[in-house]
Structures are given as structure tokens and as C-alpha cells.
Amino acid sequence: MARKTRPARTKTKKTLAGKASRKPLAKAKGKTKSAKTSTPATRDALDDMVDAAAKALALKCNPAWMPSIKANLEIILRQAALVDAFALPDEVEPAPVFEA
């Protein structure tokens, strides 16, 4: 009796358009990148900001999470810049308070 072969395992990842894309998973034998072999990233202002905030809040940040933390912080800062760039005239009043 012949053995059936399975198709290669894939990892599903949602794209910005909402469609799923499939990538083959890396094999366990030496195909994954280790943190030791990667080149050290250069530090920038976001690294310093994350470190200062973590220290001020007494949080321990796993170095593996730093790229994700920096990406989220960058998005938040870009959105805040959009709000800050919107000029309001001096005559604008706050919206009335709704009471039920």
C-alpha cells in the first residue's frame, strides 16, 4: 500500500485588503533565522522613547517585542500628527452635552 503524501504546511496571513495569503512554513532543519545571526538594528528616537516610557512605568519589555512596539507607536504618532495638523478657528465652540 502506497503512503499518501501531505501537501506542505502553510501559514495563513490576512493582508490589508482582507484577503488571506498563504506562505509555506519554514522547515525545522536550519531554515529559520536565529536572533544571533541577524544584524543589529540601529537605534533611533522611537527606541529611546519606548525605553524611557517602559522605565517610567516600571515595565519589562521583551526585546523580541520591540519591533511591534515601535510599529504601533509610529502609527499612533502619525495619527496624532493628523489631529494636531487640523487647524480649528477661534470661533469654534465645543459640541453641546447630550443628556438623556
Image: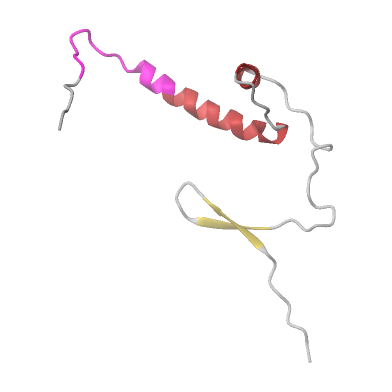
Image height of 67 relative to 28, above or below: above
Residue 65 location in percent, x, y? 66, 35
Residue closest to the far bottom: 1
Q: Where is the C terminus found, in terms of image quarters?
A: top left
Judged left or right of residue 56, residue 32 is right
Image height of 20 relative to 90, above or below: below
Tell me, yes or no, whether the highlighted magenta stretch contains residue 90: yes
Depth check: 50 or 15 in front? 50
Q: In which quarter of the view is residue 12 placed?
A: bottom right
Judged left or right of residue 19, residue 87 is left
Residue 53 location in percent, x, y? 60, 19
Tell me, yes or no, whether the highlighted magenta stretch contains residue 54: no
Residue 31 location in percent, x, y? 80, 52
Q: Where is the N terminus found, in terms of image quarters?
A: bottom right
Q: Which residues are magenta?
A: 80-94
Query: What residue lies at 70% left-to-right and 74% top-to-bottom?
Result: 6
